[in-house]
Image (tube, helix red, strand yellow):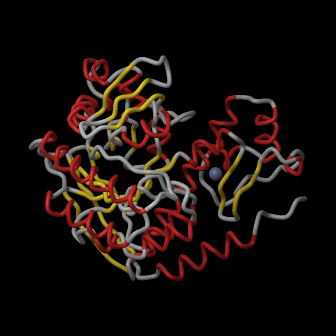
Amino acid sequence: MTTRFAFEKLAQDGKARLGRITTPRGDIRTPAFMPVGTAATVKAMMPESVAQTGADILLGNTYHLMLRPTAERIDRLGGLHTFMNWSKPILTDSGGFQVMSLAGLRKLTEDGVRFKSHIDGSEHMLSPERSMEIQRLLGSDIVMCFDECPALPADRARIEESMRLSMRWAARSREAFGDRPGYALFGIQQGGLEEDLRGESAAALREIGFEGYAIGGLAVGEGQEAMFGCLDFAPDQLPEDKPRYLMGVGKPDDIVGAVKRGVDMMDCVLPSRSGRTGQAFTRHGVVNIKNARHADDPRPLDENCTCPACRNYSRAYLHHVFRSQEMISGMLLTWHNLQYFQDIMAGMRDAIGNGAFAAWEADFHAGRAEGDIPPL
Ligand SMILES: [Zn+2]
């Protein structure tokens, strides 16, 4: 068993990269999709079921966990892996993004962010130092720098000011993280959609030095075309020999487009959240299981999918339990969606390894363009 954190690029096809991250808690095959376990659970899923879909790593949210049950309590109970019964790697975000989107009465200063909990209104402070402490108490394998980013569109002066603050916080995060063999600290590139600001941010991060680099500040309302425009240059500004993580992305076609542009890791709540609202992602696009067309349909959601929702249940049953608001509805559709996302990742890894990414991508888009199977 390895005791250190490392990244190895195994193959490249165009800009798409096949790789492997090794950690003391196991390997992460890249490109990797990380399901989101916000409150120490991927909602509606047992952790062993999440692993069965092919996930090598989960994401946990610092903001939620620090408020409830608190990082100190999780530490006393043996750390997040033990607490939630997930033995593979865990990445935690820094809390910065969610403070800005969820908390009330925020006050941003050079030191950090003071805010009120959205749960009970209690006052808290997050700074680079406190975020590093919380993520260490959680036992996170991949720790993210504490940063700040404006929602897009924002004017250039605001993006520039915010990026420079985040780079000062990145240096403080590195200092506070210290020397922890086997654990990784990722820097986060900011700079909106501006190529020169992204370049300045990347240079600042490289100067500090990190085990991996994230692309932050995207998927915040700019749209896919603008995001891909930025991804045409942003990954290239980051070190070639370290993993690149695009935060908070995305829909299946966003993920494929990001991998094509040189991204190695992604996370999104979409497969689990959509599963709870009756939306299933399939090779033929999105299926809304609540639609009446499924009420008498004995066929599976996707006949080629290996998940329990598709192997053991009909569209008619999935439709019925959704309409009846039975818990198994969210469980089955979440499992299916997570399986579909992991199948996409596995498909891309195979294709990159075989130098066939372009053909795989054409097939992916053709399947989606066909649309769902016709009603009976
Ligand atoms: Zn399925």
On the image, the x and y values in percent for residue 81 come to 32, 32
Query: Residue at the spot x=48%, y=29% of the render?
Result: 104
Residue nearest the viewer, comparing 206 with 90: 206
Q: Is residue 80 left or right of residue 219?
A: left
User: What is the quadrant of residue 247 in the picture?
Assistant: bottom left
Report how many numbered discs are placed on residues in the image.
0
On the image, the x and y values in percent for residue 318 come to 76, 41
Residue nearest the viewer, comparing 309 with 183: 183
Does residue 177 appear in this view?
yes
Query: Residue at the spot x=80%, y=64% of the render?
Result: 373
User: What is the quadrant of residue 85 in the picture?
Assistant: top left
On the image, the x and y values in percent for residue 311 come to 67, 49
Farthest residue toward the front? 157
Query: Residue at the spot x=36%, y=63% of the render?
Result: 264
Residue nearest the viewer, comparing 264 with 162: 162
User: What is the quadrant of residue 192 in the picture?
Assistant: bottom left
Farthest residue toward the left? 179
Q: Is residue 110 depicted above or below 10 in this figure?
A: above
On the image, the x and y values in percent for residue 25 come to 25, 43
Does residue 342 appear in this view?
no
Q: Is residue 214 left or right of residue 302?
A: left
Quarter containing the C terminus: bottom right
Q: Is residue 176 left or right of residue 281?
A: left
Q: Is residue 375 depicted above or below 235 in this figure?
A: above
Q: Is residue 168 left or right of residue 80?
A: left
Q: Is residue 68 depicted above or below 109 in this figure?
A: above
Residue nearest the viewer, comparing 85 with 60: 60
